[in-house]
Amino acid sequence: LPLHWGKAWAWLLVVWALWLYEPEKSRCPGHSPTNKSLFLFGSTPEEHALFAVFLSLEAATLFLWLLLAKIYPFMARSCQTAFALRYFWRVRRATARPGYSYMPNGACCSLRRRNFQYTGGEDHEGKPHGHGVWQDDSHHGEVFDGEWSHGRPVAPFVSRAFGSGAISYGRKIGYGTARAEGVSDLYNLPKRSQEGVLRLGTLGVECSAAGGFMAHLPKLVEEQHEQFESGSQLIRELRTSFAMMRRSTWGLDQRPSAAQVSELDGSNGLRFTRSASSGPDGRSSVEPSSDNSALIFVHGYNCPVDWACMRLGQLMTLGKFSSRVMPLVFSWPTGSLFSFLHVRNILPAFAADLAEFLRELHSGGIQEVHIMAHSMGCELVTAALPHLEALLSTTTRGAAVDPTGGTGESDSSSPSLRISTISFCNPSCPSPTFFAEDGFLSRLMCICGRLTLYADREDTALWAAEFLTREKTLGRHTEPIEYGSELGQRIDVVDCTYMDANISGIRHSYFDLNSHVVGDLQELICTGLPASRRSRLVRTSMDSRSNVFAFLAPPVFVNW
C-alpha cells in the first residue's frame, strides 16, 4: 500500500508541475531563454513549494513503508525472548477471560490490550501439537483451526483474519515428478533426473478462499514437504490428511458426492440419483468408491513443482471440491520461458512418466482418475497416449491393488483403473494433428469417459504459439466438434472468450481463479454431468446436437 501511495505522489507531481510550469519567453523567436533554470526544481516560488511538498510526502511514504514492511517484521521476529515478551509485548495472563493478553504493536505503539489463547494438543515442551485452535482478537490476529507440529501450523487448516475477515485454507497436495530440479527450482532447459526415477511427495499449500484475498497467497506452508517411496505411502498420507478435514466443521466437504447427487426431472417432478461416471447418454454408470478418486493436474511449461501445487490448491479451495477427490500434480521438466520450441520437440521423452505416475497411484488404491491439463501439459497427455493405452489394458486384466493403501498380490478380481474425464484448459495442441483421422481425438475418446475443452479465441499466448509454429492451436478452437452421434455426446467445448473476471491480459491461465470456470470444473469432476446439464453453461447454437457451450455470466462492467 505505501508503494502505491508513492506512485500516486509521483504522478501528482507531474500533473501539478505541468500545470504550474511557465517557460520564460524569449525576446526573439528561436533564441534560448536568458534565465536558465532546472525544471525539476522550478523557477517560481509556487514550483519550489510544490517540489518541497512532494519531497515531504515521498519521504513520509518511504518511512512508512520501511516501518511496516521491514522494521516491524524484523522486530517481531527478534523480540521473542522472555524479556521482550514481558516488557515489549507486555504478555500476561488475562483476568477477564481464558488465555493471555498483550500489546499487539508493542508497548510503545498499541492503544489497548488484546487477547489470545490456544486450545488443543501439546507436545512434551508445551508447544501446540496435533489438532488445536488458536484465537487472537487483534486486527491482524487470526482464528486458526487445524493441525500443528511442535509449535508450527501445518496443513490441513482453516484460518480467518480477525480484522478483515479474509479466509484461507491449508491443504496437502500430492505430486509425482522425474525432473532434475528441486520443487522450487526451474532450469532454463528441461532435464530429467539422472536416475530417471519418479519422485513422490506432498506439499502443504495455503490459498485464499473468501473475503479480502491476501497478496502473499497462495504460498507453501513452511517445513511441510514430505517424500515417499511408493504410491501406497503417498495415498495413505493424503487419505489421513483429508480424514482430518472431514472430521472438522470447516465446511470443506459439504457438497454431495457424485453418488449422492439428486436431480429434479422437469417432466414429472421426480428425483433420481446418479452415480459417478457418465455414459454416452450423459448418465452416470459406475458408482465411485470412497477415497479412490484422484484429480491429476498436468501443468504447462515454464512451471516449477511448487507453483503447480499452489495452482491446484487454489482450484480445490475455490471449487470446494469434495475431500474424497485426491489432488495430485504430475510435474514434468518444462524449461523456462524462452525454450518453448525445444521443449515441444522433446515432449515424448517425458511422456512415459505420466503413465508410471498413474501406475503408482493405482497400486495405492486409486481406481478413478480425472486428468486436467493446461497449455503444453495437454500436449504431454497426447504424447503419453501409447503409454496410457498400455497401462489401462494392463490394469483392466488385473493388477496388484490394495484399497487400504498397502501392496497386494496380483488378482484378476482387483478393481481396474479408469480415466473418467479429461479436461484441457487452453491447450496448445496443434489442431491438424489433433483432429486428423485416427489422431489424438479418437484415441483420447477410447481411454476416457468425457473430454472437455476450455477454449479462448483471445488467448494471446496461444496466438504467439501459432505465430511461431504456423499451426492452429486447439485452445483457440471454439467450433463444434463433429465426431459421430455416440462419441460426439461425450465431447464438450466450453467457449471462455467472453469471460473477463479474474483474467489476466494474455487470457491464458485463469482456470483456478475465475469462479465460473472453477465451478464448472468442480461440477464436471464431482458429478460427471455433460455440459448440456451442468448448471453454469448454455448451448451457443440452436442446434441441439451442437457441443459448444458458453457460461451464463454477465460481463464485469454490467451493473445497475
Image (spheres, rainbow, N blue to C red):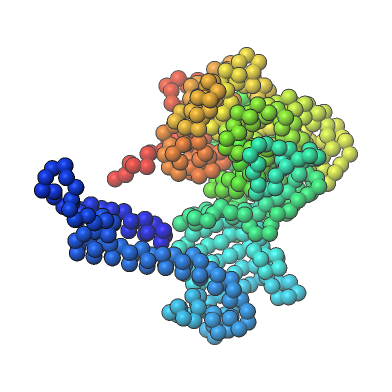
Q: Is residue 369 above or below residue 4?
A: above
Q: Nearer the viewer, residue 46 or 468?
A: 46
The reply to whether residue 194 is visible in this rendering is yes
What's the residue at 48%, 28% (across, down)? 463
Q: Position of residue 58 (x, y in %)?
A: 36, 63
Residue 54 image offset from top left, x and y in percent: 30, 62
- In the rendered image, the residue lying farthest to the right is 409
Q: Choose between 348 and 192: the one closer to the eye.
A: 192
- Residue shown at the point (49%, 59%) measured from the top left: 166
Q: Is residue 494 visible?
A: no
Q: Position of residue 140 (x, y in %)?
A: 49, 68
Residue 41 appears in which quarter of the rendering? bottom left
Q: Residue at x 49, y 56 (%)?
A: 214
- In the displayed structure, 284 sits above or below 223; it is above
Q: Position of residue 247 (x, y in %)?
A: 66, 58
Left or right relative to 407: residue 533? left
Image quadrant where residue 394 sits: top right
Nearer to us in this view, 531 or 440: 440
Q: Is residue 351 left or right of residue 4?
A: right
Q: Quadrant of the C terminus?
A: top left
Q: Quadrant of the N terminus?
A: bottom left
Q: Quadrant of residue 219?
A: bottom right
